[in-house]
Amino acid sequence: MNKKELAALAKSEEISLSALENGIKTNRIVVVKNPRGKKPLAIGEGCFVKINANIGTSPHRANIKEEMAKLKTNLPLGSVPIYSAAVEVTEKYNDVRKMSPETLWEKIEEEAAGGVSFVTVHTGVSEKIVRGLQKGTRLINIVSRGGSILACWMLANKKENPLLADFSRLLKLAKKYKLCLSLGDGLRPGTIADSTDCFQLEELFTLGQQAKEARKAGVSVIIEGPGHIPLHQIEMNVKLAKTVCDGAPLYLLGPLVTDIAPGYDHIVAAIGGAIAGMAGADFLCYVTPAEHLSLPTPEDVKEGVYASRIAAHAIDLSRGKKSAWRQDWLLSSARNKRNWPEQKKLSLNPDKFPKRKEKEEDCCSMCGDFCSMRFSESISKK
């Protein structure tokens, strides 16, 4: 990016140009962009919190038209190459364990050349960790799809994770295609019972070392963080990840703060995401109401995105972002004036506003004639 583009990006993020440039230099900020899109996004220290939405089919439900409806965007795109590699091998051999390392490498390069801005690569899942899992100390061994595929492959082939064994090759590919590496959390806890255990932490320390190697090679990285974490462990987890990875942008799935809410996990994740953002997380992966249940519908995706956007905005308020504060002030001002069209226009999701009857113009159906704001107007009038 040239100086003019960087200055425009800094302005949109409400940070100084020097802070942006220094953040990029030290990998505390990464910039991603869709080759077809006009606007790059900055993720990291001092920037607005960003959110990610996942799309894709499953073997039990494949509706390309529905997935394309989720994709209407010119925002930066990421991918998980292990998924397409696994599908290709399974179709050919009916056994993902027969995947050759070259198949995975080819998929990474193919998707990088195709224009994705970042790839999730599970570089911290080691043969040592996988063998440790065989002792049965976890309630749920691996909930990361990519992590579990690699684990099964390593055990069957008695070989190290190729992405870990040849991390320098991955860095060369990333350098060639100006690709951001999202270092995946293959050992993230999938239940509160497994939160902050030795397997999660060992993977994190590996990612920290890889983040240092990437910085030396001039490759930007994002660190993916834990999944199910109780409220009282979130701040510690975020600060530990930031310390171990020298402040690299932190990307969290949630975290989900309880296991008991299938159908409401978008709310569970928004709670965890808001707390994580307060502690320094930069990038939130949305969670839909269908998490743990099924492939999300477009409506599930919409609900998941809105829940994450609420969490992100709440974090931005806590960080003192002026435009975030102004949004709240403008809406509250319209609410005080009972200006319903303006409230609808300023709200996060105008579709949630009900149709109003003419007699409700100066009040809502909650309080009716006993509207607190109407009564309280007399306090300031003279």
Image (cartoon, rainbow, N blue to C red):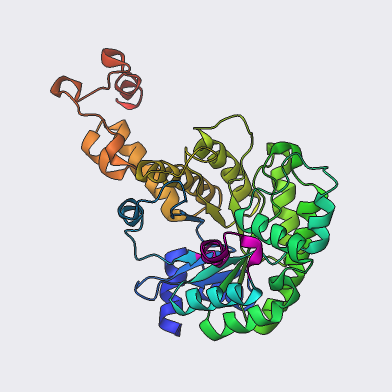
**Residue 185 can be seen, yes or no:** no
Who is closer to the viewer here, 378 or 338? 338
- Report x, y in % for residue 288: 47, 42
Taking the magenta stretch, the answer to whether it contains residue 98 is: yes
Range of magenta residues? 79-99
Is residue 157 something one can see in this rendering? Answer: yes
Instruction: Give the side of residue 340 with respect to residue 191, left or right.
Output: left
Q: Position of residue 375 (x, y in %)?
A: 32, 18
Query: Residue 116 location, x and y as percent?
Result: 46, 72
Give the vertical position of 104 relative to 304 (above or below).
below
Looking at the picture, tell me which residue is in the foreground, 365 or 219: 219
Depicted 211 relative to depicted 370: above or below: below
> Which residue is at the far left?
358
**Quadrant housing the C terminus:** top left
Q: Residue furthest front?
A: 93
Q: Position of residue 349 (x, y in %)?
A: 33, 42
Report the residue at 63% width, 48% height from top: 276
Image quarter for residue 350? Answer: top left
Q: Nearer the viewer, residue 185 or 90?
A: 90
> What's the residue at 72%, 54% (across, down)?
239
Residue visible at 79% across and 54% down in the picture: 201
User: With 172 as the anchor, is 308 left or right in this view?
Assistant: left
Task: From the image, give the main secondary structure of the stretch colored magenta.
Answer: helix
